[in-house]
Image: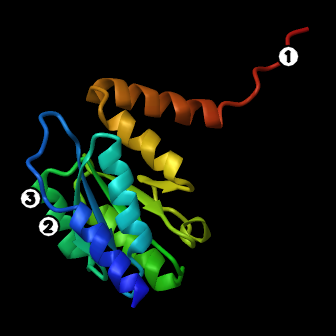
Amino acid sequence: MASAQLRSLLGAALRPAPRAAGAPLVLFATLPSERHELGLLISALVAMGEGASPLYLGVELPPTELAKAAELASASALVLAVTHASKATGRDLAETRSAIPRATEIWLGGAAASNLELPPGVTLLATLEDLERQVRRLHEPRAVRVVRKGARSAKATRSKPPLRG
């Protein structure tokens, strides 16, 4: 009963409001077989606090529906919450990534997010601070985001230069 009241309060705080000019639209949902939504609702409020326009889609949504929503809304990002990892969850995540427009980023958070093998194009959100950082990055011009994201990837995979003797 307490979680239902908390869910109601959080949902009320997310009532759709006019989208601020330039605010990135970020969708929030869970994949099939995932019913836990309190962390997801809190994440949507955190994103709102960072200047995003959150749109809560709900729980247990199939990849095809997530793709339709992302395309129709021209979403900047889709946040998925995972509290238990399974092979089916991994398949649904991969299917979602392949179905969603490449321009829409996918961010994965929740207690079991780090237990999944992430397909290319999916970013792990280990903390709410990670979410805040990603939302702030969405406020940057697209060209700057692509360059920064590429620079991070290159830095992470850079090997040591050969020794000169």
Residue depth check, mark 1 versus mark 2: number of the one nearer the observer:
2
Where is residue 123 shown, x and y percent of the image? 47, 52
To which residue does mark 3 refer? 72
Q: Is residue 112 left or right of residue 77?
A: right
Q: Residues within 10 Å of mark 1 (few under 14, many from 20)?
A: few
Q: Measured along the vertical axis of the image, is residue 84 above or below residue 121?
A: below
Rendered-image quadrant of the C terminus: top right
Q: Position of residue 50 (x, y in %)?
A: 35, 41
Residue 132: % across, % down: 44, 44
Measure the C-alpha gap from mark 2 to mark 3.
6 Å
- For mark 2, does the 10 Å Cα neighbourhood hold few (<14), some (14 to 19), or many (20 or more) residues? some
- Residue tagged by mark 2? 68
Q: Residues within 10 Å of mark 3 (few under 14, many from 20)?
A: few
Identify the residue shown where x is 48% and y is 63%.
109
Q: Where is residue 144 shown, x and y percent of the image?
A: 35, 24
Q: Which mark is residue 133?
A: none
Q: Residue at x 20, y 66 (%)?
A: 67
- For disc 1, the marked residue is 163
Per the image, label 1 sits on a secondary structure element best described as loop
Q: Nearer the viewer, residue 8 or 138?
A: 8
